[in-house]
Amino acid sequence: MLKYHLYSADISPFAQRVVLQMEYKGIDFTQSHPPGGLGSPEYGLINPIQKLPVLTVDGVHLPESEIICEYIEEIHPEPSLVPEDPMLRARGRLIRRIADLYVMNPMMPLFKNFVRETRDQTVVDTALAYIGQGLTFLNNWLPAETYSIDNRLTLTDFAVAPILRYVAEFPPVFGMSAPFQGLDNVHGYINACRKDPHIERGLARIEAGWEAKRSGAH
Ligand SMILES: N[C@@H](CCC(=O)N[C@@H](CS)C(=O)NCC(=O)O)C(=O)O
């Protein structure tokens, strides 16, 4: 049996995507924060990209959440988290790609600009504009009342729901007061997702992670 270790953090939407998938499939794995911290030389040997998550499989290090999830899906196809139909599979990948490239990536500069005194407002405004645009892209493909594809829980929901939870939390801190306003599909979709106990567990972990960080526990 393969031995899995995941370098992760509760607050990471990318790590939660993998954690949710492995939990759903009942796969045994251990977890830890990166040894020495994300930027440490020690972690650089595990992941030269110095980001979370990394799945270590029998000593081999695999970074990038999407790549990890696809690998897990191939090794542990049951219970399946991808549709049978190739076009629906492609649609799921497309939604995940939009969420990663056009919504979550533009959010990254916000995290470097939390402190008001040193905030670069031009960078923040550009980031907010891109996030808004990415959400309108997502609005074209997400349904308003159910899971993202196939009318059932899939990998795409494990990827997109944590990212949308981030959108609900952080852009408002920078003045984007209602990120989902006018985006009925995105808004309805995230509300529908929270009714699923698997997704809810991941989102609750992210929220608890934020809380722990705020109270100085991490
Ligand atoms: N494309 C990567 C993104 C991973 C990512 O950005 N992870 C964040 C945590 S949520 C991170 O490690 N950030 C550290 C940094 O950028 O220095 C993936 O899907 O795994």
Image (cartoon, helix red, strand yellow):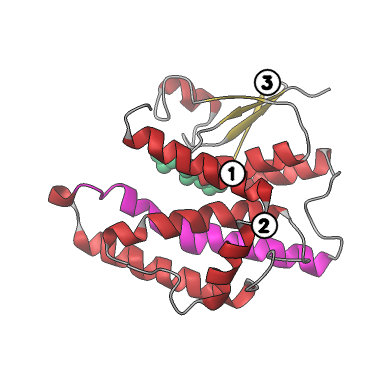
Q: How far apart are marks 1 and 3 (CA)?
A: 26 Å
Q: How far apart are marks 2 and 1 (CA)?
A: 14 Å
Name which residue lies at 36% across and 34% down: 213
For disc 1, the neighbor class at 10 Å (few under 14, some 14 to 19, many from 20) is many
Name which residue lies at 39% across and 38% down: 211
Three-letter amino acid code at the position of disc 2: Thr
Q: Residue furthest left?
A: 117
Magenta part of the chain = 86-115
Seen from the viewer's position, the closer of residues 71 and 78 is: 78
| Mark 1–mark 3 CB contact (< 8 Å) | no
Three-letter amino acid code at the position of disc 3: Gly
Question: Which label's residue is closer to the chain start, 1 or 3?
Answer: 3
What residue is shown with label 3?
Answer: 59
Name which residue lies at 36% across and 55% down: 170
Q: Give the SS element for disc 1.
A: helix
Relative image position of residue 11 (x, y in whole percent): 47, 40
